Every structure is written in C-alpha cells, then in structure tokens.
Image (cartoon, rainbow, N blue to C red):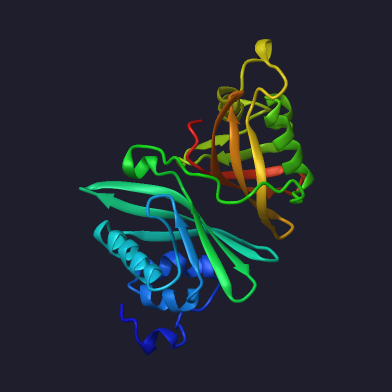
Amino acid sequence: MQDGPDRDAPSGLRGWLSDVYFPALVSAQADQLVRRLGDRATVDDPIFGRTTGMPALARYLEEIAAWLGKHSGAFDKVAFVTGSDRDVTEGTLSLTFEGRAVKVPVAVVAERRPGREVEIRLYYSTKPIKGTRAIRSPLLPQDDEVAVPLQVATQLDALSHGDVTSVMASFENGAVLRDAAGQTHVKENDGGPLRAYYEALCPPASVKTKGAGIEVLKGARADDGRICALEYTVVRVRGKNVAPQAGLAVYERGETGLLHSVRVYEDIDG
C-alpha cells in the first residue's frame, strides 16, 4: 500500500461499511476498504487486535487480507440491520487450515461518529480457528439507558436471575438459538435442545439464587423494528463473576411478538 496521493482517491466500494468489510478483504480490495474507512478509522478484531489511523490501519488490513487469502477465506452474508448510528452485518466466514475446513459465525459492526470517524468491531469466537478462546476486554462502556425491545429486556432479566422458565417463555415455539460455535438449539414444546442449552448455563432450580445466571451490561444497539443487535459486556456466567468480556447477540422477533431466533457472537465459556 502506497502512502501517496492515491489514498485520497474515492473508493470503488459501495454499500454499508459492515456489508463490504469482509467481501473487500477476501477479494483483494483492501486498498478500496482503506479509502472507505478514512484516516481516522479504527478496527478491532479478536485475533488481530485494535488499530487506529493511517498508515498503521492500511498495513493491518493488508495483513488480514493476506491471512484470509492464505486460508482460502470466503464470506457468506446471513443478515443485516441498521440503526441511527451503526450498521451490523452477520455472516459465516469459511476458512481452511491444512485441509481442515472451518466455518465461523461472525458479526461486523460499523459505528458512525461525528467528523467522518468510523469504528469497525468484529465479533466471533476464536476457538474454531485457534483452539482457544480469546480473552477480550470490553469494547464499549456500560450504558443502562440503551433501549431494547421488551422481549429482549425480559430475557436479559430472566438470565441474570438464572430463571430458565422465563427465558424459555420469551421464545416462540420452534424458535432457534445459534451459539457462537455455530450450533443450533431449537425450542420444542417449551423444552428440547434450547432448554437444555440454558439449563447448562444456569444452576439447577434447587440451588438457584438471585443473580445466579448470566449477567450482561448493555453497551449499544441497532434496531430496525424486527431485528435488534445488542453489543454488551458479559460479567457473570453460571452465577460466578468472570473477567468482563465483549460480546454481541442478535435478537429477531417473530410474528407472535416473541423471539423467533437469537444468534450469539462471543468467546465466553458457555
């Protein structure tokens, strides 16, 4: 990447930043992505870390693009939601390591700030790639004023108390949760794999106490009236405090008014 005048040329990339991020990197258009992001941009990735400003960001994106190329990276979009100051794209990143195919659910957040400043935050589990989970510090400060749909607020409160029955009641029948590893858990007749998933995260009813489940601190969200993407910090799992870690979950409402699906992007040992 040259540091000369070409960097000021318009980018050929069109579309929402979260939408074009991975497609640009897997198709040898890192230079176009640099132009779209601008000189004041920041990118935060669980594997590659956090980088701000040029020329460091240009080198950083070239490194990621080279890594994706080495491992036959491909990206398939799953869903998209935009809010007042950020857009979020979900997808599956396919990689190959010495003949081993890996598919990783990923979420890309593009936050727009004043002065043409943008920040890209990537959420995904590193365990399918590296075999270990990333210890990732919070990316956003706690903001209790972040508004989320009633269904989401109800579920977060129930989780914080380890109340699996109330968590299950926030889902419609047939609803699906896809965890950070890409495994799906379906609600079947008020139970099934989905209930088993949450029971593994929360203590049994016989020892349940207030605050014994999972607690997350809200950070920011994008919501289009149907899909809500919530960035958060996990501070308690299975009733025990854990080192605060960044995460994101996407909540999709169904026609019943209850949750139809939840997709999780984090590296908490759950």
Q: Is residue 228 visible?
A: no
Q: Is residue 211 visible?
A: yes
Residue placed at 45% from the left, 79% from the top?
35
* Rendered location of residue 83, percent (x, y): 68, 63
Q: Is residue 243 left or right of residue 48?
A: right
Give 48 or 53, whichever is nearer the viewer: 53
Give 39 or 132, whichever is nearer the viewer: 39
Q: Is residue 143 left or right of residue 9?
A: right
- Snapshot quadrant of residue 197: top right
Using the image, determine if residue 126 lies above or below residue 167: below
Count up the numbered dots: 0
- Which quadrant, please, contains the N terminus? bottom left
Q: Residue furthest top?
A: 206
Residue placed at 74% from the left, 49% from the top?
148
Using the image, determine if residue 116 lies above or below residue 253: below
Residue placed at 76% from the left, 51% from the top?
147
* Rendered location of residue 89, percent (x, y): 54, 60
* Rendered location of residue 85, percent (x, y): 67, 66
Residue placed at 62% from the left, 45% from the top?
232
- Snapshot quadrant of residue 87: bottom right
Give 212 or 77, whichever is nearer the viewer: 212
* Rendered location of residue 145, percent (x, y): 77, 49
Q: Is residue 252 left or right of residue 10?
A: right
Give 255 or 227, whichever is nearer the viewer: 227
